[in-house]
Amino acid sequence: MTPTLPTVLLRPGEADRVIAGHPWIYQGSILRLTQPTIDGDIVQVKDHRQRFLGIGFYNSKSKINVRLLETERVEVDRAFFEQRIRAALDTRKRHLPGASSFRVVNAESDFLSGLIVDKYEDVLVIQTSSLGMDQRKPMIVTALKSIFSPRALVERNEMASRKFEGLPDVNGVLEGEVAGDVSIKLNGLQFGVDLLTGHKTGFYLDQQVNYQAVAKFAAGAQVLDCFTFLGGFALHAARAGASQVHAIDQSKEVVAAAAKNAEKNGLKCTFEAANVFDWLKAQTGIGPHEKVIPRFDLIVLDPPSFTRSRATIPDALRGYKEIHLRALKLLKRGGILATFCCSHHIDAVMFQEIISEAAFDARRILRRVATYSQSPDHPIIQSIPETEYLKGFAFEVAR
């Protein structure tokens, strides 16, 4: 590493978080930059006493001025990326043995801040959400080809976070060809996935383990799957022996795709395109002196994030309370509510509190029977709270 590498000096008291393992250095944490540097270049970071902390990408346009990559002085080249990606792959092989579609690189979770790589069988999808990573896309692609020899490599760079880095939206096929849906296998079930325009990078891979776990409650059950997307929970429940599965999503396109997935696997489910809030409200709307008749044994609530900032948390909590209140009214005694929240800004304690409030209003007493998290291909680093976002619970209606 060249001795003339620009140095970012931190203010007193700002080094502890970095030493603990958090890779983000905000503008307000910086005392000064020892020499001018080009956005996207590598800098070294030192504390106010000139003690070396690591190297990372610099971007003056971003709120995150530095994204640390390594605590030693190394060359950030193709060999660096290949070694780091292989290490991430080894983690998946240990914790998701047998999986053929999964997240290979989960940005900060794998010490590659600003890089996501998802594997859909023999096709890879990449996202580069930081300027430094985006500029090194060619060497990242070369490293991925060396490790996986993929049939195709797709770029899905339309995340809002790119705008904060001064990056434009860019989507398309980088290598090979992708024609139509890609067929993937999750837990032995086949799913058709649109990698070019589908949600996120095509599928919610972070629920892979939870699909199986929730399905354990489905045998012989009347199941309602809300926000089904491509039918992940619905198909797993049907395979587990549910007596009936009804799945709802607002998008007509994804509902049609989910129905195709069910047919592909020889499973019987019914799908409906509807606003989940409106559907639940209609099912629980009653007149004077009437009572809602519960008819489901298992209800799954897996909505998209209701908030992406702290400012909208109150609105999000109202939304979560509403769907839980309605769902609980439709659950039979002894029935299971499997519910998930994917917003980082709403933690597990806050989420459970809003469920408790909904249960109180529905006059239901809940027994917690399971706790869920994101699949292990989305690792959680204890010193990086942002890496933990998905939380879920299964509650049994005790009475």
Image (cartoon, rainbow, N blue to C red):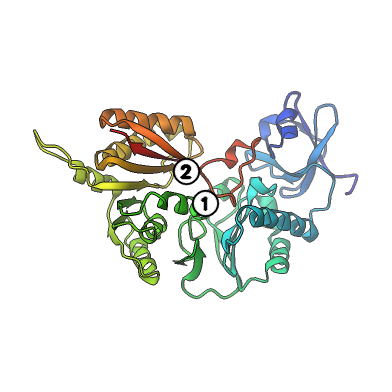
Dot 1: within a 10 Å radius of its alpha carbon, few (fewer than 14), some, or many (20 or more) residues? some
Measured Cα–Cα span from mark 1 to mark 2: 10 Å
Looking at the rendered structure, the number of numbered marks drawn on it comes to 2
- Please tell me whether mark 2 sits on a helix, a strand or a loop: loop
The C terminus: image quadrant: top left
Q: Nearer the viewer, residue 155 or 291?
A: 291
Look at label 1 and name its amino acid: Asp
Q: Earlier in the sequence, mark 1 or mark 2?
A: 1
Q: Which residue is mark 2?
A: 342
The answer to whether one can see residue 49 in this image is yes
Q: Secondary structure at mark 1?
A: helix
Looking at the image, the residue that sits furthest to the top is 12
| Residue 113 seen in the figure | no
The residue shown at (67%, 49%) is: 110
Label disc, if present, on residue 206 of the rendered structure: 1
Q: Residue at x 72, y 33 (%)?
A: 20
